[in-house]
Image (cartoon, helix red, strand yellow):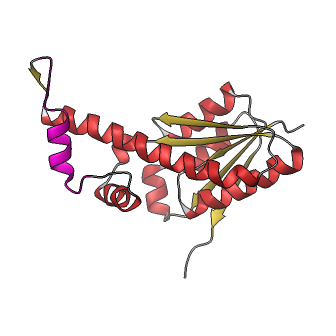
Amino acid sequence: MTDRVLVAVDGTEASTSALEIACALADNYEANLGLLCVVEPSQVSDKLIKGAMVEGILKRPNYNEWYQSSMYAQGGFAISEEAERGAYVSRLSHAIAENTVAKAEAYTKESAAKAIKTFIRSGNVADEILSVAKSERADFIVMGHDQRGRLESLIKGSVAEKVVRDAPCPCLVFCVPKKS
């Protein structure tokens, strides 16, 4: 029986398709739907920061000015530039995840899922998906996968591969076809 469907969302084309599939499963089985967004602060790039500005998540146009002015000294102790950047990236990552989950939640309003629960986690994506799937006793995991080159997959590994290999339940992975 399928009572709980967990879908990983990150705003990509693959995760949007996975969300559509998860909603269809939740509708079909009248199941609860879990929306999970995992952020890896170490993966925040200039491209992601620019995207956050375009989306209106990040209001300040100058990243360096923002993080330096926002956290310079607390309690009389100067905070190092690296710590400031880390705190800023952490807050930015969380804001991006909240925005991603809010968009996914808005999409699910037409779903017949019994209940929709959201999760935002920080850390290794595969580990966090597996952790939430176990703690929430998911009956099904749905996730998207963008096809990368073999070398990149060898170096970085594949989130989908690790989740499928170690999942406590069946998984459905939607692969976006390679563009020619």
Residue 140, by quadrant, is top right
Quick check: 68 left or right of 38?
A: left
Q: Which residue is at 36% across, 41% downward?
A: 41
Q: How many marks?
A: 0
Counting from the top left corner in percent of width and height, residue 1 is at 90, 37
- Residue farthest to the bottom, as pictured: 180
Q: Which residue is at 52% across, 50% downward?
A: 100
Counting from the top left corner in percent of width and height, residue 26 is at 80, 47
Q: Which residue is at 53% across, 51% downward?
A: 10
Quick check: 78 left or right of 147?
A: left
* 128 up-or-down from 74: above or below: below
**Along the line of sight, the residue nearer the viewer: 91 or 15:** 91
Residue 15, by quadrant, is bottom right
**Along the line of sight, the residue nearer the viewer: 159 or 7:** 7
Counting from the top left corner in percent of width and height, residue 110 is at 75, 54
**Along the line of sight, the residue nearer the viewer: 142 or 147:** 142
- Reply yes or no: does residue 69 show up in magenta: yes
Q: Which residue is at 57% across, 53% downward?
A: 103
Counting from the top left corner in percent of width and height, residue 59 is at 30, 52
- Reply yes or no: does residue 129 show up in magenta: no
| Residues shaded magenta | 60-75
Quick check: 104 left or right of 41?
A: right
In which quadrant will I find the C terminus? bottom right
